[in-house]
Structure formats: C-alpha cells, structure tokens
Amino acid sequence: MRYSQYFLNTVRETPADAEVVSHKLMIRAGMIKKVAAGIYNYLPFGLRSIRKVEQIVREEMNRAGAIE
C-alpha cells in the first residue's frame, strides 16, 4: 500500500483536553483517536509502532534468556 493511500489523520491544533506531552504528540501524529472519555482507538500508524516496540523487547528478552 502506498503511503498516500494510508489511513493517517493528523491534527494541526493540540487538543484542549490533552495535558501530557506524549498524549498531545500521539493525537497530533495520528497514532490514537479519542472515542469517548478515557477511551482511545489505536490508528494503523500507532498500532504499527506498538508492534515494533513489542518485537524489539521480545528480541532483547530472548537474547537475555528470559521467558515471555
């Protein structure tokens, strides 16, 4: 899939209800979307980032001999 066809919603303005810097950045980058109070959906870009972090942690744990 081309990047131009990728579902990516970015926001220019910082949401008023977002207080934490990382929360503001994830919403602006299109990684998460607020559904209701305290409920968020991971958008494709955010889910892909989470999967990459999981894979890195899994590789490092396996290298150290840990059990998942």
Image (tube, rainbow, N blue to C red):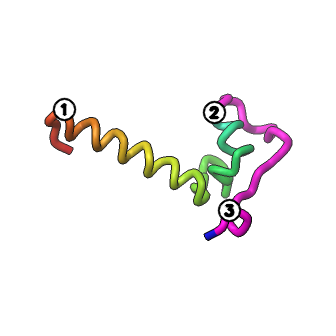
Kind of residue indicated by mark 1: Ala
Kind of residue indicated by mark 3: Tyr
Of mark 1 and mark 2, the one earlier in the sequence is 2
Q: Which residue is mark 2?
A: 22
Of mark 1 and mark 3, the one earlier in the sequence is 3
The magenta-colored residue range is 2-21
Can you say which quadrant of the picture contains the N terminus? bottom right
Q: Which residue is mark 3?
A: 3
Q: Is residue 24 above or below residue 2?
A: above
User: Measured from the top left, where is residue 42 in percent x and y?
Assistant: 57, 55
Q: Which residue is mark 1?
A: 64
**Along the horizontal axis of the image, is 55 left or right of 34?**
left
Q: Residue at x 68, y 29 (%)?
A: 21
Task: Classify mark 3: residues with Cα within 10 Å, few (<14), some (14-19) or many (20+).
Answer: few
Mark toward the viewer: 3 or 2:
3
Q: Residue at x 73, y 64 (%)?
A: 4
Task: Classify mark 1: residues with Cα within 10 Å, few (<14), some (14-19) or many (20+).
Answer: few
User: Measured from the top left, where is residue 10 in percent x and y?
Assistant: 76, 51
Q: Residue at x 85, y 41 (%)?
A: 13
Q: Residue furthest front?
A: 2
Q: Secondary structure at mark 3?
A: helix
Q: Secondary structure at mark 2?
A: helix
Kind of residue indicated by mark 2: Ser
Kindly indicate the quadrant of the structure image that contains residue 33. bottom right
Mark toward the viewer: 1 or 3:
3
